[in-house]
Amino acid sequence: MPIVEKIAQVVRTALGKSHYTAAIILAGGSGSRMGSTTSKQMMTLCNKPVIIHSLQAFDASEYIDEIIVVAKADEIQLYPALIKQYGIQKVTHIVEGGDTRQDSVLRGFEVVPDKADHIAIHDGARPLITPAQIKAVVLAAYDYKAAAAAAPAKDSIKVANISGMVDHTVDRKTVWLMQTPQVFYANLFRASIYTASKDKFQGTDDTEVAEHAGFSTKLVNTGYENIKITTPVDLLIAEAILRKREAEEHSDD
């Protein structure tokens, strides 16, 4: 038995935790909207690549037993050195992504071991996720079979017509902004992803894939800091948040 699996087994026993959760980290994004030839997951955020922040959070979570990275074809060779450099312990596979996000999820899912009863899917370009937030979503998935990180909408939500004129207003109390991780009971997700493949359905996120198969998802409020790196300003915001967290940690010492 590999040392990583032994450690995970010891932790599960200590916690009285019988579940085995595999995380699929999607790291196949480009830097097109960043105006850069460097992919967003490889851009530097507080002196280390964006993807490393995400991997470290999942590596530190006692509720994640192994990590599968789905990477760009031309970046796969970078990961072994990065994983070693930053002491990431739980990565078991690094696989090439597909043409779409959903294809990439499926490629990651194909190497998930049979013993995994839950699957956590996370965008590698959301580097501000924390172990505490991961725990909250995973525990909700244990209870509800499907759970996702999200935040309630703060702004008024308008639906416009094709001319850009307001058609009607949506009650924002019912509107949530989706994030990741999104965590599923493995058999539920297996049914969802293969139903989507059969129907040639492409969802905008994994909860929509589950919806298409007739399953509901419990939303877990993880606040507004779990942003996705998409544009240059997102890097500035993420750095400010990380600096704030660092200052708060030092003030507690």
Image: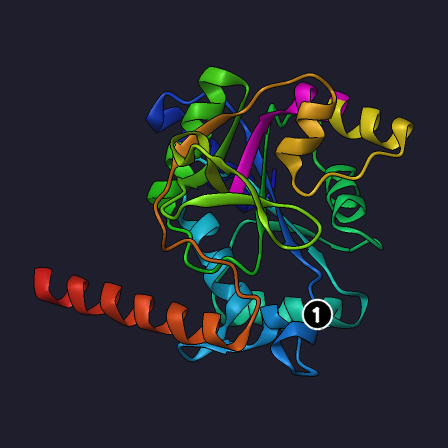
The front one of 152 and 133 is 152
The image shows residue 57 at horizontal and vertical percentages of: 43, 53
Q: From this view, report whether residue 79 is shown above or below residue 118.
A: below
Q: Looking at the image, which residue is at 56% across and 61% down?
A: 125
The image shows residue 145 at horizontal and vertical percentages of: 55, 19
Residue 253 visible in the snapshot? no
Q: Quadrant of the C terminus?
A: bottom left
Look at the image and give the residue range highlighted in magenta.
178-191
Q: Element at badge 1?
A: loop
Q: Horizontal placement of 28 versus 230: left or right?
A: right
The front one of 34 and 175 is 175
Q: From this view, report whether residue 142 is shown above or below residue 127.
A: above
Q: Horizontal placement of 39 versus 191: left or right?
A: left
Q: Quadrant of the N terminus?
A: top right
| Colour pattern | rainbow
Q: Horizontal placement of 109 versus 67: left or right?
A: right
The image shows residue 211 at horizontal and vertical percentages of: 67, 24
Residue bearing the label numbered 1: 30
The front one of 234 and 180 is 234
Q: Horizontal placement of 142 versus 243: left or right?
A: right
Q: From this view, report whether residue 251 is shown above or below residue 4.
A: below
Residue 121 visible in the snapshot? yes
Say whether residue 56 is magenta: no
The image shows residue 73 at horizontal and vertical percentages of: 81, 66
Q: From this view, report whether residue 228 is shown above or below residue 17.
A: below
The mark tally for this picture is 1
Q: Tag 1: Cα neighbours inside 10 Å, few (<14), some, or many (≥20)?
A: some
Q: Looking at the image, which residue is at 37% across and 46% down?
A: 131
Q: Looking at the image, which residue is at 57% across and 47% down?
A: 122
The front one of 25 and 176 is 176
Q: Amino acid at mark 1?
A: Ser
The quarter of the picture where residue 219 lies is top left
